[in-house]
Amino acid sequence: QVQLVESGGGFVQAGASLRVSCAASGRIFSTYAMAWFRQAPGKEREFVAAISRSGGITRYADSVKGRFTISRDNAKNTVYLQMNSLKPEDTAIYYCSATEGSSGYSTVSSYQYWGQGTQVTVSS
C-alpha cells in the first residue's frame, strides 16, 4: 500500500500561480503511476493530469493543458502539480492518486489510492 498526503493549496487571485505537492509513503513510489484529480462543489471528481512511473509520459485534461504541469521526483517520493494562469473555474479540492495498473489514466476507478485533498480557491 501507499499513503498519500497533499499540501500547498491556498487562496489566490485569478492569473496567479500555485504548486501543490503530494508526498507518498509506504511501498516503492516508482512502482505507481500518479495523477491529480479535482472536485468542485456539486460536481463529480474530474481528471486533471497524470504521469507515468518514470515521469517520461504525461497527460492533461484539455481544460488545463498549457497551464498546468505535472512532475515527479522519485527520489523524494513526491509528485507535483504546477498551476499557472489560474482561473476561478479551477477552484476545487485537488486530490493526488496512485495506481498499480497501466490503463485508464483519466478514470477515477483506475486509481486504488487517494490522498485527503487540498483546497485551491481562485478569486476573480
Image (cartoon, helix red, strand yellow):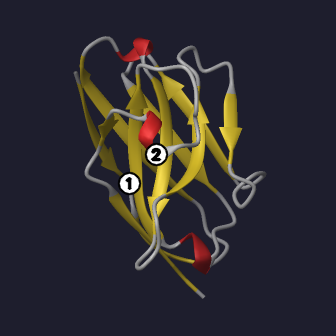
Figure disc tally: 2
- Judging depth in this view, the residue of 19 and 45 nearest the camera is 45
Classed neighbour count for the residue bearing mark 2: other residues with Cα under 10 Å, few (<14), some (14–19), many (≥20): some
Q: Is residue 86 above or below residue 83?
A: below
Q: Locate residue 40, reporting x and y percent.
A: 45, 72
Q: Is residue 75 above or below residue 93?
A: above
First reached walking from the N terminus: tag 2 or tag 1: 1
Q: Is residue 10 above or below residue 18?
A: below
> Seen in the image, is 70 located left or right of residue 98?
right
Q: In which quadrant is the C terminus drawn?
A: bottom right
Q: Secondary structure at mark 1?
A: loop
Q: CA distance from mark 2 to mark 1?
A: 22 Å
Residue pictured at 32% horizontal, 47% vertical:
6
Q: Locate residue 68, reporting x and y percent.
A: 66, 51
Q: Which residue is mark 1?
A: 8
Q: Which mark is residue 108?
A: 2
Residue pictured at 72% horizontal, 55% vertical:
67
Q: Locate residue 24, reporting x and y percent.
A: 30, 29
Residue pictured at 68% horizontal, 51% vertical:
61
Residue pictured at 59% horizontal, 61% vertical:
17
Residue at the bottom extreme of this rendering: 124
Indicate which label's residue lies in the foreground, 2 or 1.
2
Classed neighbour count for the residue bearing mark 1: other residues with Cα under 10 Å, few (<14), some (14–19), many (≥20): some
Task: Tell me the amino acid under the disc marked 2.
Answer: Val
Q: In which quadrant is the N terminus drawn?
A: top left
Q: Secondary structure at mark 2?
A: helix
Q: Is residue 103 above or below residue 16?
A: above
- The answer to whether the residue labelled 2 contacts the one labelled 1, judged by CB atoms less than 8 Å apart, is no
